[in-house]
Image (spheres, grey):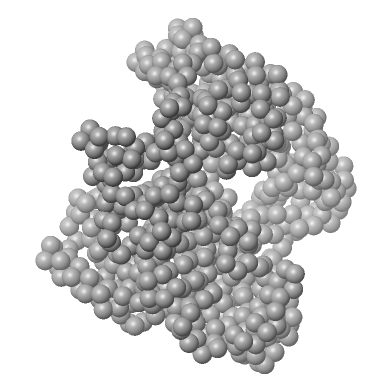
Amino acid sequence: MDTALQQMKDLVKKLNEAAKAYYQEDREIMDNREYDELYDRLEKMEKETGIVLADSPTVNVGYEAVDSLPKENHETPMLSLDKTKDREVLREFIGSHKTLLSWKMDGLTIVLTYDGGELEKAVTRGNGVVGEIITNNARVFRNIPLKIPFQGRLVLRGEAIISYSDFERINRSIEDVDAKYKNPRNLCSGSVRQLNNQVTASRNVYFYAFSLVSAPGEDMHNSREYQMEWLKKQGFDVVEYRIVTADTLDGAMDYFASAIEKNDFPSDGLVALYDDIAYGESLGTTAKFPRNSLAFKWADETRETTLREIEWSPSRTGLINPIAVFDPVELEGTTVSRASVHNVSIVKELELGIGDTIQVYKANMIIPQIAENLTRSGDLKIPDICPVCGKEARVIKENEVESLYCMNPDCVAKKIKAFTLFVSRDAMNIDGLSEATLEKFIARGFIHNFGDIFEIGKYRDEIVSMEGFGEKSFENLMDSLEKARETTPAKVIYSLGIANIGLANAKVICRHFGDDLDKIRRAGEEEISAIDGIGPVIARSLAEYFRNEENNRKLDHLLAHLHLHSEETAEEQSFAGMNFVITGSLEHFSNRSKAKALIESLGGKVTGSVTGKTSYLINNDKTSGSSKNKKAAELGIPVLSEEEFLKLAGRDPKESE
C-alpha cells in the first residue's frame, strides 16, 4: 500500500503540474496521450486502493463561501500536554517503555471524521471542548484523502501547517508591511478558518495525522505505532516519529535536533507518547494533561545585546504597542534587531531602560522576544502623547494588564484603518479609495468621519490636481459614492467597525430588529445577547458603541447621505428559523452564493454541515451516496432538488437563474 500510495502522489503531482503549465502558463510539458495514460492509471489505482487524495485531478472540489463557522463540541475533550525543556526529565518519563517520539508541529490542531470511506467532518481544536467546523476548508488541504479504504467511522487528530517557503511566498505578495503575517502558525490559523475555501486552497495547507481517536471494529494490536502505520495505509501523511526507550533516546534526539535546522515546516518541539495503548490510558489524566504523553520544548537560543530604543507603534484600536530596538544579534540563523514588548505591564516587569543589557531569544524559534533584562535600570519613560497625532496618550489597566492608548478619536493611525474597513467590498463597497488615497485625504483634512466621504465632491479642484488622481479618477469615485448611497442597515452596522461584529452578525442583528436602526441603537445588552447566535461579548460591544454620544452623532451624519432599504420584508420571512445545507452542482442558480442569498432574504440560514438543526438539504442528486445525503437520511432530514426548493421559496424555476 505504501508503494501504491507514493505512486499515486507522484501521479497527482505530475498531472497537476502539466495542467497548470497548459492552462495557466500556455506551455505544454506533456502531450495529451501521455496525460490521458497517467490519468487513467491514477483513476485505476484510486479504485483499487479506495484512496482519493484531495488534490487529485479526478475530483473537482468545489469552492464554497460561508457567513460564519458553526461550532461543535468534541466527542472527547482535547487536553494540552505537560512539557519540559530538560532531556533527563524526558528520559525519566520514557523509562523502559517503548515510546513514539515525534515532531510537535506548530500549526492548528484539526479533528477529522470519516464515515463510509468519505470525509464527513473537520473541526478545529478550539478551546479543547468546542471547536469550529471547517469541513469545506479541509477538503482543499493539499494532502487530505477525500476517500479512504476503511468503511467504518474513523476519528483522528492531526496538525494543519503551512511551510516556511509558502509562508515567505505569501508574505512577499503583501506590500503593506503591517499586513504581513508574523509567523507560519498565524497564517495557518487564518487560512484554515477562512469563510471562503478558495482562499484556503491558495495557501497550500498540509495535514499530518498524529493520533487515532477511534476506529470501531478495527484491531489496533494495542499499539500506537500500529495505529500510525494503519493511518498511512488509509492514505494519510503522519507526523514523522522514532521508536525510543530511555537507552536509545539520545540518538533520536540528536537526529531531531539536526533535522529541525533543515525542515521546511514549523515545529516547536517533540512529543513522547507511550506505544502501549492500554497502559497509557490506564494512567488517566491530571486536571490539565494526559499522563501517557509529554512534550519536549527546545531550549531557546539566547543572546546578550544592548537596548537602544523603544518605538511606540499605534494601531487602529488606539492601542500603542512598545517595540524594543537593540543592537543586531544572530538568533536561530537570522539577524534580529527588534522585538515586541507587547504592553506597558511587561515594560515595567522587565524594568527596561535605554542602554540596558538584555537577553533576547526567538519564541518557538520564530518570534523575537526579550527573555531577561540584566541591568534593570527601570528609567524608561512611558510617553503621555501619541507618536502619530501628538495628542494625549494614557495608560489604561484592564484585566490586570496595563497598556498605552491614544485618547484622540481623530488620530490618523486609527482613522486610516477604520476608513479602510468602511470602504471595503463587504461594507460600503466604495471603489477608488485605497488606503494610500484615504491617507492623503485625511492628511489634507478632507475627511474626519464616515459621512465626510460622501461630501468629498466639494474638494474637486484640489483632488483632480493631486498626483495620480485626475478628472477620470474623480468621476469614477463620484459614481462609486452614488452607488454606495443605496445600502442596507446590516452593511452600515458592519462598516462602523464595531469590535467583534462582522457582516454575518450584523445581518442577524438587523433581521431581529426588523432593520430598524433606531431600535438597535436603543437596545440593551440583555436584549441583544438573547438573539440566537449573538453572545454577550458582541452584545456588550454593540451596546457600548451606541451609548457613546459622539458615535451616534457621526452615525446621524452618515445616515443623512444614505438611502437604506431592507434585504427582506416581513411578509417574505417564510424561511425564518430554518437552516439549509446546499451540496452538489446547481442548474437554476449561477453559483451557490445566489442560492444562499435567496435563503437569507427569506429569513433562513445556510450552513456547511448536516446536523440535527438542519431543516432541508438541497441536492439535485437525491439518490447519491454522499456523506451529506447519508447524514440527512440518518437524521430524517428532507432532501430537496433545486426545483422543489424553488417551489418551497415561492419562486418559479423557469424564471430563476
Q: 401 or 441: nearer the eye?
A: 401
Q: Is residue 441 above or below residue 98?
A: above
Left or right: 310 in relation to 498 = right
Q: Is residue 196 above or below residue 568?
A: below
Q: Is residue 24 above or below residue 296?
A: above
Q: 430 or 167: nearer the eye?
A: 430
Q: 399 or 633: nearer the eye?
A: 633
Q: Is residue 341 above or below residue 457?
A: below
On the question of residue 531 being in view, the answer is yes
Residue 370 image-quadrant placement: bottom right
Q: The N terminus appears in which quarter of the rendering? A: bottom left
> Residue lying furthest left in this view?
33
Q: 295 or 182: nearer the eye?
A: 295
Residue 39 in the image: state x and y as whole percent: 20, 68
* Residue in view at x 53 percent, y 45 percent: 180
Residue 225 in the image: state x and y as whole percent: 52, 85
Residue 308 image-quadrant placement: top right
* Residue in view at x 80 percent, y 31 percent: 394
* Residue in view at x 36 percent, y 53 percent: 638
Residue 650 image-quadrant placement: top left
* Residue in view at x 82 percent, y 54 percent: 373
Q: The C terminus appears in which quarter of the rendering? A: top left
Left or right: 94 in relation to 193 = right
Residue 564 in the image: state x and y as whole percent: 47, 19
On the question of residue 411 being in view, the answer is no
Left or right: 283 in relation to 400 = left
Residue 254 in the image: state x and y as whole percent: 60, 81
